Image: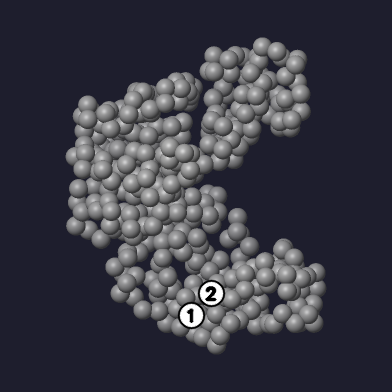
Amino acid sequence: MINQLTKPEIQEFIKDHLYDEPSSLMLKANHYPDWPMKLIVEQIQAKRKAKTKLPSWFKTRGLIYPPVLSMEQCSSENTARYKMSLINAGLQMIDLTGGFGFDFAFLSEKFSKAHYVERQAELVEHAKYNFNLLGLTGFEAHHGQSEEFLTSQDNFDLIYLDPARRDDHNEKVVRLEDCEPNVISLLPKLLSKAKQVMLKTSPLLDIKGAIQQLGSVAKVHVIAVANEVKELVFLLDNNSERTPQIHCINLKGNNKEVFDFTFDAEERATSSFNEVQAYLYEPNASILKAGAFKTIGNAFGLKKLEVNTHLYTSSDLIEGFPGRTFRVLDKISLNKKVLKHHFPEMKANITVRNFPMTVAQIRKKSGLKEGGDQYLFGATDQSGKQLILCEKIDARQDQ
């Protein structure tokens, strides 16, 4: 496949037709009988995705991309660079689950020598080809099973793993023991071979349960991009006596929101409660995923609306909150006259937290369409079920 797709005339075709419709391109297949048009169209679709997800790869002409579904599921450049920032420079690293090599390409920059291991021979060839085009140096690409390769090699400064999260029936799996390779069974060998192990997992994985299973966890990074949790990263080493630090990260363009805590601190903390006041605060998705429900409120001196309502309030504006901040305008009902008064265009952004109605049910009953500049929170506070009308303090927080 590489020999076909890397021909200059095919690469020129990809460049010239990057934004054409796939269906129209397939109609051109008869004009190019010797070309693998289906593969070419897949490359065009994947490269188009790379423009925003992997901009430095997009700028490198001639790279071979995986299918679009794999592109959607792979690490983005900003999450890869963030993981790169977590490690110190060293002599040698190994990626035991190489795949298309997106994370490897960034992590390997920190090391004099980097080993890429992948069990699918075709992926190894793709990776080697791409790494050379990207100008990577000091890398070695190996075809084989991670377990076998690990046994035959020396020690490393870093071992990186992103286990496959699909089973033999191509069904998605989340639990560590169901992924391939099985990190739980490999863990003693991993820790004996490396100063540090970096493990990337599904964002759906239970963090507390994973810490208990893995044992030697020093830090956990809950990584969100534009307020959507994309991946969990566990850093492990042989010093297992510490309480793991939980780092909540929300990457927003060139900026990031950061909140750190420990589960011990969360368990010891107590929340203060109040009905909604002048300002309302919604933590970003990384904080909600991590479960820092008490420590986030205490860190910013905020009152929680109710024990199971993860929204916070204050009478005075608190700057720098890692999430969205709103000015409370009113508490309203779903009465048609009230709605028409507050929403002349009958549009609102609706969120529910610990509320008996879903967003869809509120929209159906109220007739409110999505959009506009106003926000409606269905939530339970100390006074009961509330519909809270708000406006966002800083529109840049959604960017």
**What is the C-alpha distance between the residues marked 1 and 2?**
9 Å
Q: Is residue 118 left or right of residue 345?
A: left
Where is residue 355, by image quadrant?
Answer: bottom right
Residue nearest the viewer, comparing 347 with 51: 347
Residue nearest the viewer, comparing 141 with 183: 183
Mark 1 vs mark 2: in front: 2
CA neighbours of label 1 inside 10 A, class few (<14), some (14 to 19), many (20+):
many
Q: Is residue 61 left or right of residue 293?
A: right
Q: Which residue is mark 1?
A: 306
Whichever of callouts 1 and 2 sits on the residue coming sooner in the sequence is 1
Residue nearest the viewer, comparing 324 with 205: 205
Q: Evaluate whether residue 123 shows in this view.
A: yes
Give, as a three-letter code, the residue at label 2. Answer: Asn
1 and 2 marks in contact (CB < 8 Å): yes
Report the residue at 53% width, 36% height from top.
70
Q: Evaluate whether residue 314 shows in this view.
A: no
Establish if 386 lies above or below 220: below
Secondary structure at numbered mark 2: loop
Report the residue at 76% width, 78% height from top.
339
Establish if 68 lies above or below 229: above
Residue 368: mark in rendering: none
Residue 332's x, y, as percent? 68, 82
Q: Which residue is mark 2?
A: 354
Residue 39's x, y, as percent? 61, 24
